[in-house]
Image (cartoon, helix red, strand yellow):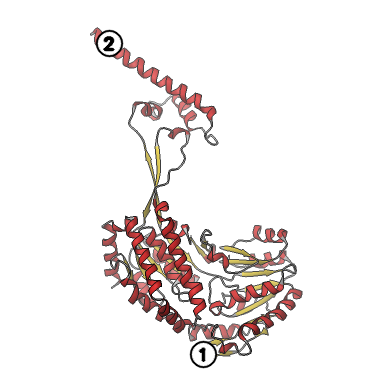
Amino acid sequence: MAENMVQTARAAFQTGKTKSVEFREKQLRGLLKLFEENTSTIVDVLAQDLHKSKQEVVILEMEMLIYDLKYMLDNLQDWAKPDRPSKTFPNWLDSLSIIKEPYGVVLIIGAWNYPFLLSLGPFIGAIAAGNCVILKPSEISSSSAKFMVDTLPKYLDNECYQVYYGGPAETTELLQHKFDYIFFTGSASIGKLVHAAANKYLTPTTLELGGKSPVYIDASANIEVVAKRLLWGKWINAGQTCIAPDYILCSKEVEKKFLAVAKNILKDWYKDNPKESPDFCRIINDKHFQRLSNLIKSGSIGIGGKTDPKDRFIEVTVLVDVKPTDAIMQEEIFGPILPIVSVNDAYEAIKFINEKDKPLAMYIFSNKKKDVRLILNNTSSGGVCVNDVIMHFAVPSLPFGGVGNSGMGSYHGKQSFDTFTHKRSCLYKNLGLLGEKLCSGRYPPYSASKISILQMLLKYRSGVSLKYLPHLVMFGLGLVTACSFKCLNKYLMDNNN
């Protein structure tokens, strides 16, 4: 099945139809129509998979994809045009262009935690860039995956865009085949396997992974605002978000204030029984529930801690007195548990962060610009959000991606188009006499005078300065004069004969 899909997609790409911008726009409008006609069904399937509320589905998945589609449609014509780069001195007589070409057949492997956003987000970019695509949604969020298998073919070209359903065995089979680009969203452990499979064919990849995204809070921040923004970012989708705040770094003084405010906020949001709230998601499966239940044993419980294995429910839980060696600090949490590690200042926070792998996101809550700059200048992460969490993901002009163990490559907005586009450099030279004279110094026999001429042509000049114009004019006149004398001499010799 996988082989047939790849062959069908490659044959479709070779017809050249996806290179038409009009064809790409038609497919993007088809996706837009899919969302417009299937809103209630998408809400239902995400409720089945993750117990997601309608608001989380509409705002955090559908509306973000609809925005991305419209943004892409508004800009695609311009982005697809060749770029005209600036010329250097030796190329004043030439034409330069950068042609935007699709890679070919792209494999996109989606994630289960945001089944539509993290599968169809890169899918939109791959279509816009003119590729054929095989989409592999995660089988863990099975209702969403089956919806995509059944529904996408009704709105898109069935040869160019196909959906492959299956588990680890089917994904392994799929990765045996040659693709022109692979885009993967998931864990670092699986990302390494995907990257190893891509190496067989030297296939370029984008890996959107994760990691332990730290939060630094200092005493200058408004703790009421901090707590609301931080708690919301941590417990949307029950913490099953790749850029969810993973742990807090703060002083004991800030910790005490945070806990007091957080308790009131959570009671306001979820009342006395969070389990009964229609706004709180569930853990995706028993395996992840058991893993998270074990992580709660780290440190001491400051807030929450209740669980229900039958319902795969884990209450909003804040852990205190957490040590760097505790189990919860050794892996990405990916659940509704938030440990707090004590540090005295920004310097200690920087040291702690730098002792771990580079995270996908970093969050800083502070009104001290000096400390914010200090942390930014002395740490590394995929992205940063100051005085909020998650929201940088929603800005289309900001590339989203990881660094180091949290991933490679990026997407969103124009970056999605660029990620799936090969930029083909083209130099157009003329065959005229003047152009040939300008570059004739490269031909043997070599000499000191030729070296001088080539050095003059190749000399680095900052910007295009008019002070060099007289030199170019004189050089050109000299060549024209030399050519004229040569032609005149030939004419006289021919007449004398």
Q: Is residue 377 left or right of residue 94?
A: right
Label 2, residues with CA under 10 Å away: few <14, some 14-19, many ≥20: few
Q: Residue furthest front?
A: 36
Q: Residue furthest right?
A: 253
- Residue under label 2, please give it: 493
Q: Quadrant of residue 437?
A: top left
- The picture places residue 448, in percent across and down from the top left corner, at 46, 24
| Contact (Cβ within 8 Å) of mark 2 with mark 1 | no
Label 1, secondary structure: give it: loop
In the displayed structure, 384 sits above or below 43; it is: above
Question: Three-letter amino acid code at disc 1?
Answer: Asp
Which one is in front, 310 or 347?
A: 310
Q: Quadrant of residue 150?
A: bottom left
Q: Residue furthest top?
A: 496
Query: Which corner quadrant holds the N terminus?
Result: bottom left
Question: Three-letter amino acid code at disc 2?
Answer: Met
- The picture places residue 310, in percent across and down from the top left corner, at 51, 92
In the displayed structure, 134 sits above or below 280; it is: above
- Residue under label 1, please give it: 311
- Residue 100 in view in this figure: yes
Query: Which corner quadrant holds the C terminus?
Result: top left
- The picture places residue 281, in percent across and down from the top left corner, at 53, 82
User: Mark 2 to mark 1: distance in Å?
Assistant: 102 Å
Q: Quadrant of residue 339?
A: bottom right
Label 2, secondary structure: give it: helix
- The picture places residue 471, in percent across and down from the top left corner, at 50, 24
Q: Nearer the viewer, mark 2 or mark 1?
A: 1
Q: Is residue 423 left or right of residue 5?
A: right
